[in-house]
Image (cartoon, helix red, strand yellow):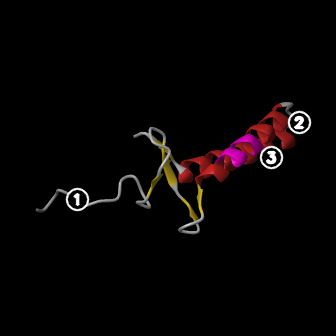
Amino acid sequence: MCLADAGLTGLYILDCECLADLADVLHRPEAEELRQWAQRVKQGLESLWDEQTGIYQNRRTDTGEFYRRLSPTKGRCPVGR
């Protein structure tokens, strides 16, 4: 899929933040780098904010347009037709 995915981006940010917290507990030097990555990705996430709908939306990477479905897998299921 040619989408910048808002949900996966949010999960990646949370992953970086949680790993940074673990690195702190273990006194590992990676904590600061993980927090920097989370901050960079948070800044990029802002490009997925859609003023029209008031939510973060996936964005097509080929055209730059928002993908208006709330899930890239949302649609009719062909099973049982």
- Residue position marked by numbered label 3 in the rendering: 21
Q: Which is nearer the eye, 68 or 26?
A: 68
Q: Residue 27 bears which disc, if any?
A: 2
Residue at the location (68% across, 47% down)? 13
Q: Residue 77 bears which disc, if any?
A: 1
**1 lies left or right of 46:** left
- Asked whether the beta carbons under mark 2 and mark 3 sit within 8 Å of each other, the answer is no
Q: Is residue 42 magenta?
A: yes
**Residues shaded magenta:** 39-44
Residue at the location (47% across, 49% down)? 65
Tell me which label, 1 or 2, sits earlier in the chain. Answer: 2
**30 lies left or right of 6:** right
The CA distance from mark 2 to mark 3 is 10 Å
**Amino acid type for the residue under numbered disc 1:** Cys
Helix, strand, or loop for circle 2?
loop
**Amino acid type for the residue under numbered disc 2:** His
Comparing labels 1 and 2, the label whose residue is closer to the camera: 1
Comparing labels 3 and 1, the label whose residue is closer to the camera: 1
